[in-house]
Image (cartoon, helix red, strand yellow):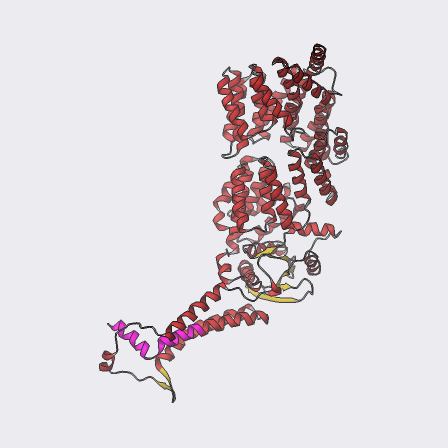
């Protein structure tokens, strides 16, 4: 009852009406000051002061409204009621009138607008326009700030789905086109020039200064065409520990100045100390690692990431980047360790980085289907992410979904708004896999024209050369491979391997053995264990084709001794195990199968295929044809290429099921992308085995056709090769019979 009388007294004194009016006017005043203050570059503290003033004035206004009335005679003290008059006050009941309804609606609309309607934005900025962040203006002399603060500011602004930040790798490409590759700092004049050249909406400049042990941080938004400062903000940080909090405040101001609504800003803001790290030193190590020759897979970068994690064990981004490094160098065990830590910390990250890491991790693990799904989720929220479209395209490419891959890569070029050599290279690879070699060569050449140094990158040189091999131009391939022979030891090693595989393809095994020996020596000197293992597996295959069986077995023993130290992926245990079981040692091959089982990543189809393939080979060697076929057929649905198909075709060939063997061999010889790697030997000898299968099936025409094609490939082959002699004899006999 007393409660009802109190509110009735509030109504009598006009306090409720005053509260409504104050809320409407107060919010309107805050909104107006935010708009006008932004136009006149008012400092951020003035806006906070107005909010505090408005909130602080509310209780004062309510007290004054209780004590005084505004009448026709002026402001008078409200008369108190005696107990009888108080008892006569009506009970609390709300009977809305039009005035109350209108005030309520105004209050609701004003509040909603304050948090959702974008502010008048600088430079006519629109959603998903681009800004360029210049390098830090560091007036403190403390190097810990140089790249770390720029990275931190980028991370916190990049949480926005409203603003796009021009990526640093695109800046580097622009500098190359401007013939200014040697530039080490993107200062304000250069940033303005780049922004104008690339038609970006704004340049953002971050400055830090020290004053009496405290720090002053400021941001300025510049018009790229005039250099004029259109908005600026400034905050103070008492010490280093408060700098990241100060950056949060500055980033919020930038997002607001460019027109993002407060609602979206508050929904998509994770404090920097949580999203990155509380340690500026750790942040410096992370950013220094990213800046090393723009190569995150550098050994020195790895050590920097380790130092960052020592300073902050909960630094999720450092764990994620280190996981990428380990997977790149095929150290799956350490990669998984850091992936597990990074995934356990994703709740600390911004939405953008959390979605990025979750999608990237599935790619590292080889779970391509899941990675594609997660990149799709990422891109639905951040459609202007060049890197996201690039990663999606790469995963499609690894799944041999080449048309979809080309589409994603093309989209990445649209976002990039220029030709990126890395994207052009991958499009070239996709066309090569599709068998469109002319178009593939065209894209390779466009990429190398933009960046000639890429032709000397070992893997790209190799891929480009073997595209010419598939076109039937091996001499063009040789010229490309020879470009590496005058380079550093890494390049010479890979050049020798490429030349060896070309010689092997042509049946020039004596030359191939010499070249692959050269590569092995150099890879061993460089400490590239996995590369040495691959070279030795190639060498074992070469010895076998030459009929040098003791050398073949010795090489397999060497591979068995080193595989555990240099390889973590199941695929290499399968390649070695397959050779071992074909030599009649299923027990030793079973040891390789156990290693595959221990190292398999769930969802990685290549891992799963490796297990089923080797298991199928072992089961076949034990005489269980049906069990073997079931395993091998299942494996080829997980990974479909000439190497995996060879195991299945071999089963049918060895058991005399010629029609089925022919069907698979026919498919093998039509597959693009089979040369230049382990599948090459299977591909070349598929022509020979196909001819034999046709001959056994009584189809002389088919046999003649494929003996001829095999001998065309081996037109310059070593004369002492057993298959070469057999193919010539059989072709001559069949041709004579046909006459």
Q: Is residue 166 above or below residue 738?
A: below
Would residue 16 be counted in the magenta stretch? Answer: yes
Residue closer to the observer: 634 or 568: 634
Residue closer to the observer: 349 or 501: 501
Q: Which residues are the magenta region?
A: 1-24
Residue shown at 71% from the left, 39% from the top: 444
Q: Is residue 124 visible?
A: yes
Please identify the quadrant where the C terminus is shown. top right
Q: Is residue 373 above or below residue 544?
A: below
Residue 323, picture quadrant: top right
* Position in image of residue 395 (x %, y %): 58, 39
The main secondary structure of the magenta stretch is: helix
Residue closer to the observer: 37 or 134: 37
Please identify the quadrant where the N terminus is shown. bottom left
Residue closer to the observer: 602 or 585: 602
Q: Residue furthest front?
A: 739
Residue shown at 57% from the left, 58% from the top: 127
Q: Is residue 580 visible?
A: no
Q: Is residue 297 above or below residue 567?
A: below
Residue 75, picture quadrant: bottom left
How many discs appear? 0
Residue 143, picture quadrant: bottom right
* Position in image of residue 342 (x %, y %): 51, 44
Would residue 31 be counted in the magenta stretch? Answer: no
Q: Is residue 24 left or right of residue 202?
A: left
* Position in image of residue 228 (x %, y %): 67, 67
């Amino acid at each position: 009852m007393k409660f009802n009388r109190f509110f009735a007294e509030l109504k009598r004194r006009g306090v409720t009406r005053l509260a409504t009016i104050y809320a409407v006017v107060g919010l309107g005043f805050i909104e107006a000051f935010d708009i006008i203050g932004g136009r006149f570059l008012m400092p951020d503290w003035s806006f906070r002061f107005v909010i505090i003033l408005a909130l602080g004035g509310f209780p004062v206004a309510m007290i004054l409204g209780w004590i005084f009335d505004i009448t026709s005679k002026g402001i008078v003290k409200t008369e108190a009621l005696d107990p009888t008059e108080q008892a006569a006050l009506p009970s609390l009941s709300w009977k809305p009138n039009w005035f109350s309804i209108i005030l309520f609606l105004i209050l609701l609309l004003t509040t909603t607008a304050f948090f959702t309607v974008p502010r008048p934005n600088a430079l006519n900025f629109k959603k998903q326009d681009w800004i360029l962040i210049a390098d830090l203006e560091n007036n403190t002399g403390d190097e810990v700030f140089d790249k770390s603060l720029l990275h931190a500011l980028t991370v916190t602004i990049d949480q926005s789905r409203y603003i796009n930040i021009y990526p640093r790798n695109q800046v580097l490409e622009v500098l190359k086109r401007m013939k200014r590759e040697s530039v080490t700092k993107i200062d304000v004049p250069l940033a303005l020039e780049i922004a104008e050249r690339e038609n970006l909406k704004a340049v953002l400049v971050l400055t830090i200064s020290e004053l009496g042990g405290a720090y002053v941080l400021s941001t300025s938004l510049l018009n790229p065409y005039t250099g004029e400062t259109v908005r600026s903000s400034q905050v103070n940080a008492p010490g280093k520990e408060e700098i990241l909090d100060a950056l949060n405040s500055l980033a919020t101001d930038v997002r607001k100045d460019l027109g993002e609504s407060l609602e979206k800003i508050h929904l998509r803001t994770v404090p920097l100390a949580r999203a990155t790290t509380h340690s500026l030193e750790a942040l410096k190590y992370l950013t220094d690692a990213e800046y090393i020759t723009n190569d995150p897979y550098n050994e020195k970068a790895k050590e920097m990431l380790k130092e960052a994690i020592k300073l902050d064990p909960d630094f999720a981004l450092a764990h994620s980047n280190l996981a990428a490094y380990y997977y790149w160098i095929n150290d799956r065990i350490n990669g998984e360790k850091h992936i597990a830590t990074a995934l356990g910390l994703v709740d600390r990250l911004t939405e953008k980085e959390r979605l990025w890491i979750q999608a990237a991790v599935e790619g590292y693990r080889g779970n391509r289907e899941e990675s594609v799904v997660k990149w799709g989720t990422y891109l639905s929220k951040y459609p202007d992410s060049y890197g996201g479209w690039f990663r999606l395209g790469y995963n499609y490419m690894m799944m041999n979904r080449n048309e979809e891959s080309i589409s994603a890569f093309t989209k990445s070029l649209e976002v990039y708004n220029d030709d990126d050599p890395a994207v052009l290279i991958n499009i070239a690879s996709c066309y090569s896999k599709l068998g469109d070699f002319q178009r593939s060569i065209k894209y390779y050449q466009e990429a190398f024209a933009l960046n000639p140094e890429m032709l000397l990158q070992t893997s790209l040189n190799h891929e480009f050369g073997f595209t010419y091999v598939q076109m039937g131009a091996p001499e063009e391939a040789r010229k490309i491979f020879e470009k590496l022979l005058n380079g550093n030891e890494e390049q010479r090693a890979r050049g020798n391997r490429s030349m060896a595989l070309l010689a092997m393809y042509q049946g020039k095994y004596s030359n191939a053995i010499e070249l692959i020996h050269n590569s092995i020596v150099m890879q061993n000197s460089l400490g590239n264990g996995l590369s040495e293992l691959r070279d030795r597996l190639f060498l074992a295959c070469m010895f076998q084709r030459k009929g040098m069986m003791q050398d073949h077995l010795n090489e397999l023993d060497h591979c068995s001794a080193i595989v555990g130290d240099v390889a973590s992926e199941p695929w290499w245990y399968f390649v070695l195990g397959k050779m071992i079981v074909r030599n009649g040692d299923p027990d030793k091959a079973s040891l390789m199968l156990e290693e595959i089982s221990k190292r398999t990543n769930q969802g990685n189809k290549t891992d799963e295929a490796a297990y089923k393939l080797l298991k199928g080979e072992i089961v076949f060697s034990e005489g269980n044809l049906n069990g073997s076929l079931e395993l091998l057929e299942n494996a080829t649905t997980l990974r479909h290429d000439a190497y995996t198909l060879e195991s299945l075709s071999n089963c049918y060939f060895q058991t005399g099921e010629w029609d089925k063997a022919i069907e698979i061999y026919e498919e093998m010889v039509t597959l693009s992308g089979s040369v230049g790697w382990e599948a090459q030997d299977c591909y070349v000898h598929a022509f020979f085995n196909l001819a034999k299968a046709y001959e056994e099936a009584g189809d002389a025409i088919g046999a003649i056709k494929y003996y001829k094609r095999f001998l065309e490939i081996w037109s310059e082959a070593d004369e002492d090769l057993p298959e070469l002699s057999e193919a010539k004899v059989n072709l001559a006999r069949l041709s004579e019979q046909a006459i």
